[in-house]
Image (spheres, grey):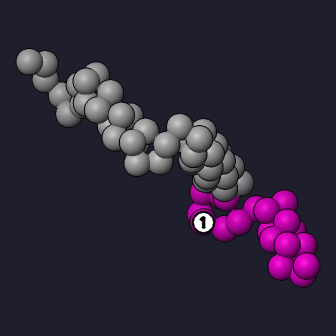
Amino acid sequence: MGEGLFQPWHLVVIAFIALLIFGPKRLPELGKGIGDGIRALKHGLKTSDSDGKVSKDTDDANKTTNAA
């Protein structure tokens, strides 16, 4: 057997269990939600400065969101 944490058949088993739990109709919705979350996280990391301060464009967007 191969070395490593995940083998290809592990991923097949995980995908099959996810299909059984969520069904074929909800899996694309879940994938889209996870992808949107990862994109938002990457965007948030790019817009923050190296010292932890939020950049001006992100801060302005937060002010308009909170005002609504």
Judge left or right: residue 39 versus residue 58.
left
Q: Position of residue 14 (x, y in %)?
A: 32, 37
Judge left or right: residue 20 versus residue 61.
left
Q: Residues within 10 Å of mark 1 (few under 14, many from 20)?
A: few
Q: Which residue is nearer to you in this view: 28 or 59?
A: 28
Up/down of 44 relative to 27, above or below: below
Q: Which residue is nearer to you in this view: 65 or 21?
A: 21
Residue stretch in magenta: 48-68
Decide whether residue 47 is among the magenta residues: no
Q: Position of residue 5 (x, y in %)?
A: 20, 33
Residue identifier under label 1: 52
At 84% from the left and 60% from the top, the residue drawn is 57
Up/down of 4 relative to 39, above or below: above
Q: Which residue is nearer to you in this view: 56 or 9?
A: 9
Decide whether residue 61 is among the magenta residues: yes
Q: Position of residue 18 (x, y in %)?
A: 40, 42
Q: Quadrant of the C terminus?
A: bottom right
Q: Secondary structure at mark 1?
A: loop
